[in-house]
Image (cartoon, rainbow, N blue to C red):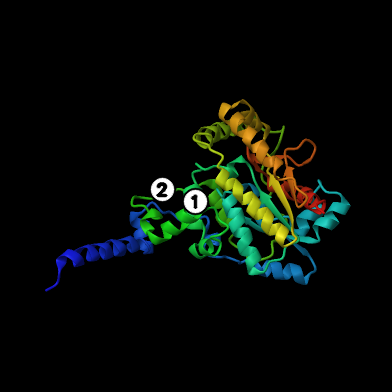
Amino acid sequence: MVNNKYWFPLLLVLLLFLIDKVVLIPAVQSCCTQYRGNPFESMANYDFKQDAIVQAARESGRKIILNLGTSRSMGYYRTPTPEHIAVSQYLTDAERKTLSEYQIVNSSLPGASILSAYVRMAQWLDHGLKPDQIWVEISPFSFNKNSMWASFELKHGVPADFALRYLNRLPAEHSKTILTSRLFQVIRFRPGSADQSKSQWENLFAEATRHLDQLPRGIPPYTGVEQGRESKEQLLKYRYVSSEMERTMFQGYKMDPVYARYLDLIRARAQEQGIALVFWKPASHPLWQSVLKRNDSATHWMTEWNRTVARLKTPHSSYLDMDQEGLLHCRFFVDPVHIGNRCYPEMAVRTLQAGAAIP
């Protein structure tokens, strides 16, 4: 006779396990969970669609730069192209020649933290990419423990096999979250209904990455308004966006020392392979800079940020602040924190120069 005392708990565990796996069915995810798509899909799926671009660059004798960032460096998916470099009014002839010798391979993910930069860098280097320079976009929000994307990035962005392979390098706190979320799927796909609306930058990301296997050509449509020439309506929009960012991004902000460890991991890997490394902070509109100066929370964590920046300047890595006075002459902004794509050739040259200065 079967002893129900032992079989019932076993069957219950098995049933719960099966129910947990039901959320892996796409139809169930769409109808019954809060999941609405994965902006970190290229990282989660080891996506190397830009291999064709790398191959074309190598065949033409150009050197490779790997850029890792967020929506604030998304323009690198489309430019600088040879045509854009040729007409940019912010470059000297010598700078045009130098920049034309490079091809930027971009991996910018909306909402990404420094974690994504490390994972994507490791994936590309493990894949065999040998860039001459690596650029890593950072800002205080790259280290925010309470970012609206932080949990999603860990649970959906980092592949489980990557976490296992890098178990002795990744912070234990993050490895635990990554692996547990793969074992119990309801941690990743919570029951409920998804917010189907996507942000402007998620939509632009989808458009920018549609043809990653094709070498970008031509001059991209110029975006943004030149600083100092904004209309009253434009300035009103900037103030509104700044106030909304202040309300949503500063609430609960916490610069997490766990995220700061990725700076050392990135630096160690670049140094190990003899690659020049530049950490760079994107330019922002004066309206946003004024918010950072007057907000008490921002004043506190900017002090922490300055300590973090001090760690970035080493014999093997450099730090570049695009808001440094006199550095960028091109100052066109789409909103208070996103620079227009006409400025990317000059941004690229300044970052390239910082990398070239590393011994």
Q: Is residue 198 visible?
A: no
At numbered mark 1, what does the secondary structure look like: helix, strand or loop? helix
Q: Residue 326: x percent and y percent?
A: 80, 37
Question: Residue at the spot x=28%, y=61% of the render?
Answer: 16
Tag shown at residue 173: 1
| Image label count | 2
Whole-percent x and y of residue 257? 57, 43
x and y percent of residue 159 in the render? 51, 62
Task: Specify the farthest residue to the bottom.
Answer: 1
- From the viewer's side, name the closer residue of 172 and 318: 172
Q: Residue furthest right?
A: 94
| Any part of residue 175 in sight | yes
How packed mark 2 is, by other alpha carbons closer than 10 Å (few <14, some 14-19, many 20 or more), is: few
Mark sitting earlier along the chain (2/1): 1
| Residue where numbered disc 2 is placed | 195
- In screen coordinates, is 155 left or right of 101? left
Closer to us: 17 or 293? 17
**Could you tell me which residue is drawn at 76 percent across and 54 percent down?**
84
Query: Which residue is rendered at x = 72% and y = 58% of the image?
Result: 271
Identity of the residue drawn at 71% across and 33% down = 229
Check the picture and name the quadrant holding the N terminus.
bottom left
Disc 1 crowd rating (10 Å Cα; few below 14, some 14-19, many 20+) is few
Can you say which quadrant of the picture contains the C terminus? bottom right
Q: Position of residue 157 (x, y in %)?
A: 51, 57
- Between residues 50 and 155, which one lies in front from this camera angle? 155
Q: Secondary structure at mark 2?
A: loop
Q: Amino acid at mark 1?
A: Glu
